[in-house]
Image: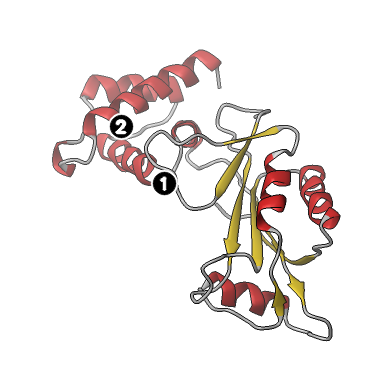
Amino acid sequence: MEEKNFRRVMELVERWDYEWGCGPWEDSLPEADEVLELNELTGQNWTAEDVRELCFECSSHNSLEETVYFLFHGDYPPVTNVNLVFYRLKPGAALDPKMVYEKYRLGNQMKALIPLPVEKITEALRSVPGFEAHVWEKCQPEGLRMDCLDQPNPWSDIHFWLFWYGGRNNPHPDHVLNISCRDLSEEQMQVLLDVMAGFGVPLQYREENHNY
C-alpha cells in the first residue's frame, strides 16, 4: 500500500468520524463520490454502509490506523496480547496461578498474598527505556499505559498496561499486578520481567491470545 494512499484514507476516516460523532446512525453515510474515491485508493469494493460500520467501530474500539488498515486489507492487523501476572505468596502457601489471577481480576481477595511495593514498581516500569506514558486527551482511565516510541508501521499500537488488583475490601490495589502487553517482542517483555525480578516478584502466570 502506498504511503500517500494510506494518508488520504486516514484523512477521510478521520473526517467521517468527526462529522458523524454519535449519530444519528441513519444519517451517518459517506457521499457516493467519497465511497468511489475510497475504493479507488484501497482497491476494495466497500459500500457506504460498510464504511459507516467501520467508522463507528473506530469511534468505540479500534484506532484510526487500524481502521484504515482494515479498509485496505479486509481485516485488522494481527495482534498478540499477553498478560504477565505477578504476585508474592506467604511462606508455605501454594495456589493455582490462573485461579489467583481470575479471583483478583473479578474483585476478590485472598489471605495468602503479600502486598507489593506499588509506587516503587510503578515508577520502575514507567522508566523502561523505549516507552513513555500515554497522554489521554479526553479522560484518564484506570491503569497506566506505556506506549512504545518505535512503532514499525503507521497502524502499529505496541504498548503495555499496568493493572493493579487488591480486592473489593482493600482500598490499596497492591496484591496482584497484571502487565497487559500488546505486540511486545519477547525481548521487550523480558525487560519487564527483569524489572519485577529486581523487586523479588516472580512471574506467576502468563496468558497469551493471538486473536484480535
**Image x and y of residue 58, in percent:** 38, 40
71 or 139, which is in the foreground?
A: 139
Left or right of residue 154: residue 152: right
Q: Which mark is residue 17?
A: 2
Query: Label 1 near label 2: C-beta < 8 Å?
Result: no
Mark 1 packing: few (<14 Cα in 10 Å), some, or many (20+)? few
105 or 39, which is in the foreground?
A: 105
Give the alpha-carbon distance from disc 2 to disc 1, as whole Å: 12 Å
Which residue occupies 29% across, 35% down? 47
Amino acid type at circle 1 is: His
Amino acid type at circle 2 is: Asp
Relative height, residue 143 to residue 24 (above, below): below
Which quarter of the figure has residue 150? top right
Mark 1 residue element: loop
**Image x and y of residue 208, in percent:** 68, 60
Q: Which mark is residue 61?
A: 1
Asked if one can make out residue 209 in the rendered structure from this viewpoint, the answer is no
